[in-house]
Image (cartoon, rainbow, N blue to C red):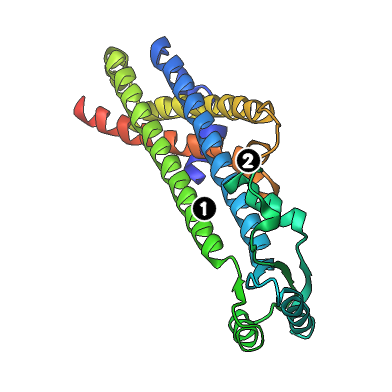
Amino acid sequence: MKGLLDLIVGDPQADRVVPPTGVTARLTIFVSAVMAFLAIVALALSLSTGRVADRWADELAQAATLRLPADPEQADAHLAKTLEILETTPGVASARALTNEEQQALLEPWFGSDLPFDTLPIPQLVEIIADEPAYDPEGLQARLTAEVPGAVLDDHANWRDPLLAAAGRVRLIGWAVILLIGASVAAMITLAAHASLAANAQVIRVLRLVGARDVYIARAFVRRYTLRAGLGAIAGVVLALIVLQILPDGGGFFAEVGFDGAGWIWPLVIPLLAAIVAFFATRAAAMARLREQT
């Protein structure tokens, strides 16, 4: 890191000893901007997916559904007994029976609105909201089984666990994409540095004749490509943030895409990471190429 800072704030005339090559200069800026754009978008999607999954998992963890047996003759007695049990259970903040309209709304996406719900033996559903600390699901289920036979407690673990696992895989994919982008930037800058060194082979020979050391010559290329990669990455980050801001806000997941809280550090870090990658890639390429030309 010290070498990178010394390079940036050091002799600004160092990179003027070698004539710039337009193609590689433009290529470096362009590719750095594109890679930074893709990195920001990938990070925004990954972090947003994680936030949404965590929020949904928290909501599922706080809520549970209790299904009572569909017995019209015992329905009222079962419901009264169930609510009595829940009111005396530590860790249960509230419990309420869903109305017929609410239960019908839950079933309509599966069976349609033409189904005669009034004539069907539909189990009574009870919504449970957990307190802090939460209740013991296994203990509550055992008590309900003993006093309300046929009652089934669903704490949404079957939904929550796959959701968290999927969010974890999305995060992993996001970081893998960032690593691939960094490797692509390093490869591109290495090729560009080799091309620039080859194009300026005659200039390098003259510099050596007048006493310039390889370290000084390499510094010219390293400074040039590091700064251009950083500037290109800044442009890519700015463009990505603009695109994220103009995404259609129609609700749902796309309303969540973006950075939040500490996540805003990444738009600041990406250009620095691009410059660091360019610094080490160009220095390694320059020193290797100069050794070959010795």
Q: Nearer the viewer, residue 218 or 194?
A: 194
Q: Is residue 85 above or below residue 169?
A: below
- Local packing at callout 2 (Cα closer than 10 Å; few below 14, some 14-19, many 20+) is few
Judged from this view, the residue extending furthest toward the top is 22
Considering the numbered disc 2 on the image, is that residue within a helix, a strand or a loop? Answer: helix
Left or right: 51 with respect to 92?
A: left
Question: Residue 267's x, y, as percent?
Answer: 61, 38
Which label was assigned to residue 236? none
Figure quadrant of residue 8: top right
Residue 267 seen in the figure = yes
Q: Residue at x 58, y 40 (%)?
A: 44
Q: Is residue 239 above or below residue 45?
A: above
Figure quadrant of residue 93: bottom right
Kind of residue at disc 1: Ala
Q: Residue at x 55, y 34 (%)?
A: 41
Question: Residue 37's x, y, as percent?
Answer: 53, 29
Q: Nearer the viewer, residue 2 or 252?
A: 252
Q: Are marks 2 and 1 in contact (CB under 8 Å)?
A: no
Q: Nearer the viewer, residue 149 or 278?
A: 149
Kind of residue at disc 2: Phe
Residue 211 seen in the figure = no
Q: Nearer the viewer, residue 69 or 216?
A: 69
Left or right: 37 with respect to 182?
A: right
Question: Residue 58's x, y, as percent?
Answer: 66, 62
Real-space Cα distance between discs 2 and 1?
A: 13 Å
Question: Residue 60's x, y, as percent?
Answer: 64, 62
- Residue picked out by circle 2: 253
- Residue picked out by circle 1: 167
Give the number of callouts.
2
Q: Residue at x 44, y 22 (%)?
A: 28
Question: Mark 2 vs mark 1: which is more N-terminal?
Answer: 1
- Local packing at callout 1 (Cα closer than 10 Å; few below 14, some 14-19, many 20+) is many
